[in-house]
Image (spheres, coloured by chain):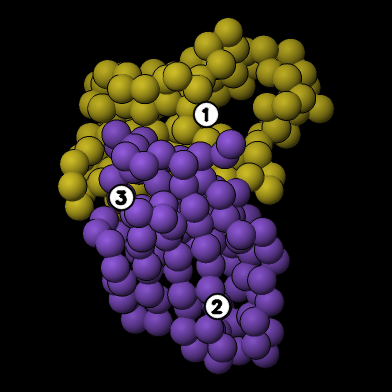
């Protein structure tokens, strides 16, 4: 079983819509959770992190965490063409990050 | 603030040759990471340094890969001899400290290695 699994893409959404990305993890002791965005040919850049159950909002991005279900999600509201990228979910266990394979999002104008 | 620097950006070698990558972390960042990202996959941690000591190298193929971080700043990652399956992007990342909200990792531009 993979440590971090993300919903397989690609995910295509129209401009202005909500993109919903999901991530599940296997280690119940995982402490914190990160979402990175990676444009094609570029390195990952941190979008958000979340430690506590519930929602965390930052601009058009909302991260949701449910530790009981071992599930973390990312919502992108009012999707823009510039949001087209691969989104990586990363899980922190003892200050080591395990990454999922990523979900590629395409926002069509 | 300058970001994480890596060189070279691209490298093409033949199998069984050796190669070295260099990383300079963000100034003041104590923790440095090397990741391997194969096309279509997420980054995989190879080795983690805290200052100049190794914290974790459990996924480093030690028969061919080595890494060092002298003086707790710059780091080099070496592959000798290279195999075809080593073709990947090698990412260096750094973080201010390994605790709480300062754990965010910042990635360099990566080195794209092609082994032929």
Q: Chain A is shown in which shade?
A: purple
Residue at screen point 20% across, 52% down: B101
Camera-side residue of A77 and B85:
A77
Crowd band around label 3 with a 10 angstrom C-alpha radius: few (<14), some (14–19), many (20+): many
Camera-side residue of A94 and A24:
A24
Report which quarter residue A62 is drawn in.
Answer: bottom left
Q: Chain of mark 2?
A: A
Q: Chain of mark 1?
A: B
User: Residue B36's x, y, as percent?
Assistant: 56, 35
- Say what secondary structure mark 1 lies in: strand
Residue identified by numbered label 3: A32
Residue at screen point 22% across, 43% down: B96
Q: Chain B is shown in which shade?
A: yellow
- Count of picture labels: 3
Crowd band around label 2 with a 10 angstrom C-alpha radius: few (<14), some (14–19), many (20+): many
Asked if the residues shown at circle 2 and circle 1 are in contact, with their CB atoms under 8 angstroms apart, the answer is no
């Amino acid at each position: 079983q993979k440590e971090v699994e993300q919903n397989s893409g690609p995910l295509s959404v129209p401009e202005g819509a909500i993109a919903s990305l999901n991530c599940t993890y296997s280690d119940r002791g995982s402490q914190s959770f990160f979402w990175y965005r990676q444009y094609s040919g570029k390195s990952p850049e941190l979008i958000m992190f979340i430690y506590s159950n519930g929602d965390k909002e930052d601009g058009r991005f909302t991260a949701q965490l449910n530790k009981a279900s071992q599930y973390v999600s990312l919502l992108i509201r009012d999707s823009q063409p510039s949001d087209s990228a691969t989104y990586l979910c990363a899980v922190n266990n003892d200050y080591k990050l395990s990454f999922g394979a990523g979900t590629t999002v395409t926002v069509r104008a | 603030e300058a970001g994480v620097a890596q060189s070279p950006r691209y490298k093409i070698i033949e199998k069984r040759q050796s190669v070295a990558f260099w990383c300079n972390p963000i100034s003041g960042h104590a923790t440095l990471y090397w990741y391997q990202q194969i096309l279509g996959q997420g980054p995989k941690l190879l080795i983690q340094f805290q200052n100049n000591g190794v914290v974790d190298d459990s996924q480093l193929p030690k028969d061919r890969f080595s890494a060092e971080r002298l003086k707790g700043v710059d780091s080099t990652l070496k592959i000798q001899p290279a195999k075809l399956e080593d073709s990947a992007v090698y990412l260096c990342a750094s973080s201010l400290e390994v605790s709480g909200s300062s754990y965010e990792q910042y990635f360099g531009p990566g080195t794209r290695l092609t082994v032929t």
